[in-house]
Image (tube, grey):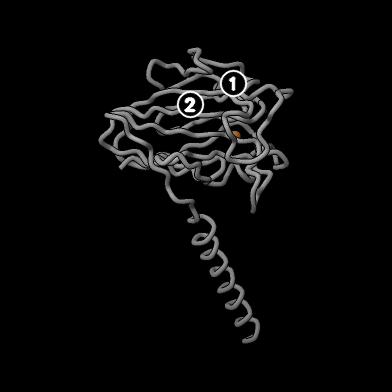
Amino acid sequence: MRGRLLGVIASFGLLVGVVVVYFIFILEEAPPGVAASVHGTTAQLTLQTDASYGHAPYPDWVTYEARDPSGHWQHSTILKIPAGTRYVHVTVYEYDTATGLRNPFFAYVRGTVGGVIQLNGRPMNYVDAASPAHTFTAPDLGLNVPLPGIDSSAKNQCAAAPCRTSEAHNTISFTFKTPKPGNYRFQCIVPCALGFLYGFGGPMQTIGYMDGMIEVA
Ligand SMILES: [Cu+2]
């Protein structure tokens, strides 16, 4: 009886330990933040979306990257915006091919200044629901930007992050008003995680890949 009780206590202790380790080392793990560059009252974020990260530990995962103010690409989705700015201007270089949306709601542009994005310089307020490779979606900001994929037969496709603008890509840009100080989650809505159940595991649930945080402070 006593042995069984000790066994139960030991198993419970082990379970608590595993949960604590999970919270501290997995859920709390986040890449370092990347600051926007500031021009007057506008914060500039420059991002890219890539078909494959190309490096350990997950070379075949889709990913975002962000460019720091010194011009270096960082494997991070923690984006830092100064609270004193009025607008955030975002440029995304999109290097992946289309997966398409499961829900056409996200084919519509929402929450940007003017309700539009520029796709390779052309203003659009929605895209074909089959065309996005990824989205930039921040539910708390009412912000949704579909990112159309490149032609799957395009030559010169990028193989590993960071991709370069000499490789096949679409350029998407848009502006939104700087929200009040706080942390705003963003994520991709396209089921782009190849090899995961319904395309929604792995990189789609990992900060630094297809999930991130906009930190206004
Ligand atoms: Cu994605």
The quadrant of the picture occupied by the C terminus is top left
Q: Residue 74, relative to residue 22: is it above or below? A: above
Quarter of the picture containing the N terminus is bottom right
Instruction: Estimate the x, y position of residue 36 in percent, counting from the top left.
Output: 38, 37
For label 1, the SS is helix
Q: Position of residue 82 (x, y in %)?
A: 30, 39
Q: Residue at label 1?
A: 104
- Lateral position of residue 132 relative to residue 46, left or right: right
Q: Which residue is mark 2?
A: 144
Residue 87 position (above or below residue 75)? above
In percent of width and height, residue 67 lies at: 47, 39
Q: At which x and y percent is residue 99?
A: 67, 28
Quadrant for ligand 1 reads top right
Instruction: Using a 10 Å C-alpha cutoff, classify the residue at mark 2 as few (fewer than 14 neighbours), some (14 to 19) or many (20 or more).
Output: many
User: Number of marks in the image?
Assistant: 2
Left or right relative to 136: residue 34? left
With 216 as the anchor, is 9 left or right in this view?
A: right
| Of the pair 8 and 39, the residue shown nearer to us | 39
Q: CA distance from mark 2 to mark 1?
A: 12 Å
Compared to residue 86, the image places residue 116 above or below, namely above
Name the amino acid type tagged 1. Answer: Pro
Residue flagged by tag 2: what amino acid is it?
Answer: Asn
Residue at image point 56% right, 43% down: 209
Relative placement, left or right, of 83 versus 136 is left
Kindly identify the residue that appears in the image at 63 percent across and 25 percent down: 149
When asked about the image quadrant of residue 156, the answer is top right
The secondary element bearing badge 2 is classed as strand
* Mark 1 Cα shell of 10 Å, populated few (<14), some (14-19), many (≥20): few
Q: Quadrant of residue 174?
A: top left
Whether the residue carrying mark 1 lies under 8 Å from ligand 1 is answered with no
Query: Which marked residue is nearer to the observer: mark 2 or mark 1?
Result: 2
**First reached walking from the N terminus: tag 2 or tag 1:** 1
